[in-house]
Image (spheres, rainbow, N blue to C red):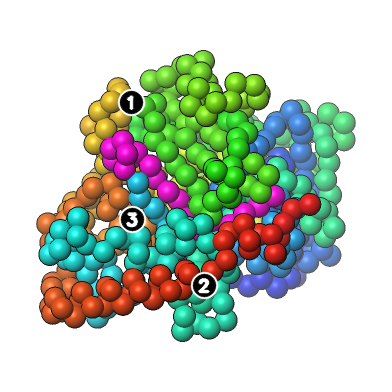
Amino acid sequence: MRSASAGRIYFGPLMNNSMTHPYQIVILGGGSAGWMTAAALSKVLDRQKYRITLVESAAIGTVSVGEATIPGIREFNQLLEINEDDFLRETNGSFKLGIAFENWQNIGDFYMHPFGPYGVTLNGVPFHHYYLRHLREQGEANAIPLSDLNLEWRAAIEHKFSRPIADKRSPLGHIKYAYHFDALKYAHYLKRYATQRGVVALEDRMVRAKQHVEQGPIDALMLEQHGEIKGDFFIDCSGFKALLIGEALGVSYHDWRKWMPCDSAVALPGQHDNDAILPYTRSIAHHEGWRWRIPLQHRTGEGWVYSSRFTDTEQAERDFRQTIGNHDSKANHLRWINGRRDQAWRHNCVAIGLSAGFIEPLESTGLQLTQSGIMRLISLLPGPGELSERAAAFNKYTAEEITNIRDFVMCHYKLTERDDSEFWRYCRDMEVPDSLQERLNLYRENASVFRNSNNELFNEISWFSMFQGQGLRPAQVHPLAEQMPAAEMQQHLQTVQRIFAQSVAQLPTHEQFIQKHCKAP
C-alpha cells in the first residue's frame, strides 16, 4: 500500500523571502484534521515568516470514535518526529497489520486485506498470478491457504506483532503496519505538539466569514469573543459543516450515495475480543450494512454502519445493541454524505479533512485523506501573489485521489453475492462508474491490476486481496506465470509458506509487545 503523501517534498523551514510581514494562516476547526494540519505546518514553517492561529469550538463538535488507520499515518508521525511509543501510550493505541472482512461475499466468508505483499514478485510478474495458477491446478480445497503466503496476514490471525527488525534480508525486516487509537486523544496530543511550536489556539465560535465580495476571498473570521481574526490564507477543518469552503465560498458537493449508500453509523464502546487486543480491524457485514471493531488498549470501539435509505436510526440502534449486548452505554449517532467538494481549494481557502470530502470508514481512509491533503498543501505552499495554478493542481490531484478510493471501497459492495436484504440486493445489482467497470473487466480477463496514476492509494496487493476474498476469479493469468514448470512453482510457494511460518513463530504476541514498549498508564 502506497501513501498518497509520497513524493519529494522539502521538509526544512519553508519561507517566502518576498514577505514583508508574517504570513497569517488561520485554521477553522480542531479535531484530528485541524490539529494534524496545525502540527505539520508548525513543524515545517519558519515561525518568523508564518503565524498560525487555530480557532476551535465545542459547538462544531468532532467525530470522536476509535480511529483505524493505514500505514501512511506512520509517515506523517515520522515527519513530526513523534516518538511512536509515547504517542501510543498517550492515545491508548495498538498496532494494525490489516483489515479482516467477514460475511462480505456470503455469510460465513472471511478474508484479510493485509498491508504487506504476498510472496515475492517472480520474473517481473506480480505474485498473485502464480497463486491464481496454483489454485487452478490444485483446486481451492487443496491449495496452500492464501493467509500462509502473506506475513502480515499470518501474524494478524495468530495475534503476533513486531516492528521491522534490522536485517532487511529477513521478511521480518519489512513488516508493514498502521495503528488503532483514540481519535480525540490524538487530537489533544497534536494540540500540545502544535502549541509548543507557536500555534495560537483560540476557543471561540465563528459568527461569519468577512468577505468584500460574496463568495469571494476571505479577509477575516468574525468570532463571538475575540472579534475579527485577519488572515492571508484560511484552512477549513470545520468537518461536515464546511463553514468556509461550503457556506462562505459556496463550493458545491458531489453526492456519491447512489454508489455508496451507507451514510450513517451508531458508535458504542465495547469489550475486547476474548480479552485479546487484536492486531487488525474487523469489518463484519450484517443485513443492514457492516460494523467495525477497533481494538484499543482499554476498550474496543464498536460501530454499526448502515444506509438511511434502507434502515431508520431507531431500528439500526436496536439491532446494534442486540448484536453486541450493550443496552446501557450512550450511543453516538453519525451521519455523512459520501462524496467530495467540486473544489477543495478556492481563492485563499483550502478544505482539509471532512470539509473536503468523505468516503465511509470501511477501508480506514479518513485520516489518510486528511494527511494527503496536508502534504499536498505543503508541497504547493501558499504565499503572497497569485494562487490560481497551485489551487488548480491541488484540486486536480485531490479529486483524482478520492475518486480512486471511492471505486475501491464501492467494489466491496458490488462484488457481494448476498441477497438476504433489500440493501445487499441493491448493492449487488447497482451500476458502477466506468472507471470501476474497466478495472473489473481487466481483472476478469487476465488478473491484471493497474494504477491510474502514482497518486492512487491502493495498489495491486489491495485490489487482489478484495477480488480474491470476494470471489472474483479471472479467466486467465499472465502468460509469463504459465511458463514456470509446475513442480518448480509448487516448491517456491511451499518455501514462502515455510519461511513465513518460521518468521511469525519468532514474534511476541501483540499484547506482549504493547506491554513491553507502549503500555498506557
Magenta stretch bounds: 92-109
Q: Point out the tag, 1 or 3, that comes first from the N-terminus.
A: 1
Q: Point out the tag, 2 or 1, that comes first from the N-terminus.
A: 1
User: In the image, what residue type sits under mark 1?
Assistant: Phe
Instruction: Report the residue marked by disc 2.
Output: 506
Residue lying at 22% horizontally and 49% vertically, measured from the top left: 472
Q: Quadrant of residue 58?
A: top right
Distance between the alpha carbons at the discs numbered 1 and 3: 24 Å
Is the residue 168 above or below the residue 305 in the image? below
Is any atom of residue 172 visible in this view? Answer: yes
Asked whether, in this view, residue 287 is left or right of residue 176, the answer is left
- Name the foreground residue: 283 vs 82: 283
Indicate which disc residue 128 carries: none
Q: Nearer the viewer, mark 2 or mark 1?
A: 2
User: In the image, what residue type sits under mark 2?
Assistant: Gln
Q: Secondary structure at mark 2?
A: loop
- Name the foreground residue: 313 vs 519: 519
The picture places residue 153, in percent across and down from the top left corner, at 42, 60
Taking the magenta stretch, the answer to whether it contains residue 373 is: no
The reply to whether callout 2 and callout 3 are in contact (CB within 8 Å) is no
Distance between the alpha carbons at the discs numbered 2 and 1: 44 Å
The picture places residue 436, in percent across and down from the top left corner, at 28, 47
- Name the foreground residue: 317 vs 81: 317
Instruction: Report the residue marked by disc 3.
Output: 465
- Name the foreground residue: 388 vs 27: 27
Instruction: Report the residue marked by disc 1.
Output: 423
